[in-house]
Image (cartoon, rainbow, N blue to C red):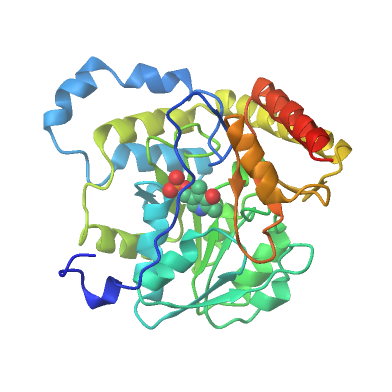
């Protein structure tokens, strides 16, 4: 630590991302897609676009917000884009909870929520899940605090129903409810429609998981226009050009290509279900994941051991050394070939460690 860091930030415990690999590994640790982005993405990244990089990107992100609005049947003034959905979450937690504000989230959920709460001085309540890792919605009814929930939740993969989301949103009219739908494309019914009915709902999405564009860094939030105006006010006070020109073009092309992504998402879901069955046959318990990852545990081998053994074989998955889930592993769904190598390796390791 230097002598210059503000006292406010000395005790920060930063978010720890899953590692990015250089050597040839099977990478099942950060919930990326195994597939390349839509071919339309390549088409729009033309030489002409590159030659125009001497100009600033459009701070109003008109092309991208229009494409997203069109895709989800909302108006462009209901869309806010960020440099990854992390950027959207950061602006929202900073702006709507703020210093001394109150926020709650599930105790086992996305690791960034506590980090944002900490850096922005927000008082965070982490609400335990039920024993089966599901969220008890009664914990969030009439809560009287801002709420952020990943739906489906990570790393459990479990999803709340549309009706349950509506109960949470409608019972907290004076607080903001952020539904982080990073994995909703794999799940089914987004609560995005509810945005038209409820002024306290912000739904966030990302191109990183379902749209094979984690490296592009684009995410967005959908809410009524007053919330979007506030988010833009914050953005224009902090980093007006938060997306670069290449990201704007590429994401706009991707979000319009439903046909390509619907097929890839269906393929991932199919591979997930098959891999899960294989793991269950090996004696694992898996949650009913609705996301592009599997959350699994076995009494036959400690999760930490299996994680290490897979690592030695250049297969990366995610292990969280955290109470209540420290015998679980989160396995991103890769290609069919990758998952076969993975399950074969797991079977072999189990055999060797009997
Ligand atoms: C991956 C993830 C994000 C962040 O995604 P980016 O758009 O890549 O910043 C947000 N929330 C959850 C629950 C995630 O898993």
Q: Is residue 220 above or below residue 172?
A: above
The number of callouts visible is 0
Q: Nearer the viewer, residue 235 or 154?
A: 154
Q: Is residue 77 above or below residue 141?
A: above
Q: Position of residue 39 (x, y in %)?
A: 46, 18
Q: For residue 269, what is the image quadrant?
A: top right
The residue positioned 74% from the left and 30% from the top of the image is 343
Q: Nearer the viewer, residue 166 or 29?
A: 29
Viewer can see residue 81:
yes
Q: Position of residue 259 (x, y in %)?
A: 58, 24
Q: Position of residue 197 (x, y in %)?
A: 56, 63
Q: Is residue 286 above or below residue 232?
A: above
Question: Is 237 placed left or right of 9 in the picture?
Answer: left
Quadrant of the image containing the C terminus: top right
User: Can you name the residue that lies furthest to the left here?
Assistant: 54
Viewer can see residue 292:
no
Q: For residue 349, what is the image quadrant?
A: top right
Q: Nearer the viewer, residue 5 or 286?
A: 5
The residue positioned 42% from the left and 29% from the top of the image is 22
Q: Is residue 295 above or below residue 110?
A: above
Question: Is 162 placed left or right of 253 in the picture?
Answer: right
Q: Position of residue 144 (x, y in %)?
A: 55, 83
The residue positioned 69% from the left and 65% from the top of the image is 324
The residue positioned 37% from the left and 54% from the top of the image is 87
Question: Is 91 placed left or right of 289 in the picture?
Answer: left
Quadrant of the image containing the N terminus: bottom left
């Amino acid at each position: 630590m230097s002598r210059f860091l503000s006292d406010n930030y000395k005790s920060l415990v930063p978010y720890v991302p899953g590692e990015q690999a250089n050597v040839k590994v099977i990478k099942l640790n950060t919930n990326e897609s195994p597939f390349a982005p839509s071919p339309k993405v390549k088409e729009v990244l033309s030489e002409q676009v590159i030659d125009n990089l001497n100009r600033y990107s459009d701070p109003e992100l008109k092309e991208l917000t229009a494409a997203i609005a069109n895709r989800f049947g909302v108006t462009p003034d209901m869309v806010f884009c960020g440099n990854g959905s992390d950027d959207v979450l950061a602006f929202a937690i900073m702006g709507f909870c703020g210093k001394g504000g109150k926020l709650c989230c599930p105790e086992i959920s996305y690791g960034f929520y506590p980090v944002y709460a900490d850096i922005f001085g927000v008082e965070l309540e982490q609400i335990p899940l039920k024993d089966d890792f599901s969220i008890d919605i009664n914990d969030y009814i009439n809560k009287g605090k801002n709420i952020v929930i990943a739906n489906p939740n990570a790393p459990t993969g479990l999803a709340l129903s549309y009706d349950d989301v509506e109960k949470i949103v409608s019972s907290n009219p004076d607080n903001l409810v952020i539904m982080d739908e990073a994995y909703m494309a794999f799940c089914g019914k987004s609560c995005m429609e509810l945005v038209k009915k409820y002024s306290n709902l912000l739904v966030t999405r990302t191109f990183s998981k379902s749209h094979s564009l984690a490296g592009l860094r684009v995410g967005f939030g959908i809410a009524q226009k007053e919330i979007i105006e506030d988010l833009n006010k914050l953005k224009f006070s902090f980093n007006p050009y938060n997306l670069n020109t290449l990201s704007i073009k590429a994401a706009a092309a991707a979000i319009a290509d439903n046909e390509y992504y619907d097929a890839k998402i269906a393929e991932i879901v199919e591979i997930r279900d098959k891999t899960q069955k294989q793991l269950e046959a090996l004696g694992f318990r898996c949650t009913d994941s609705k996301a592009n990852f599997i959350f699994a545990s076995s009494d036959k081998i400690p999760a930490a051991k299996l994680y290490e053994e897979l690592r030695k074989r250049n297969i990366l998955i995610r292990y969280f050394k955290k109470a209540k889930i420290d015998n679980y592993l989160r396995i991103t769904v890769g290609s069919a070939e990758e998952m076969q190598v993975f399950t074969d390796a797991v079977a072999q390791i189990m055999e060797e460690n009997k």
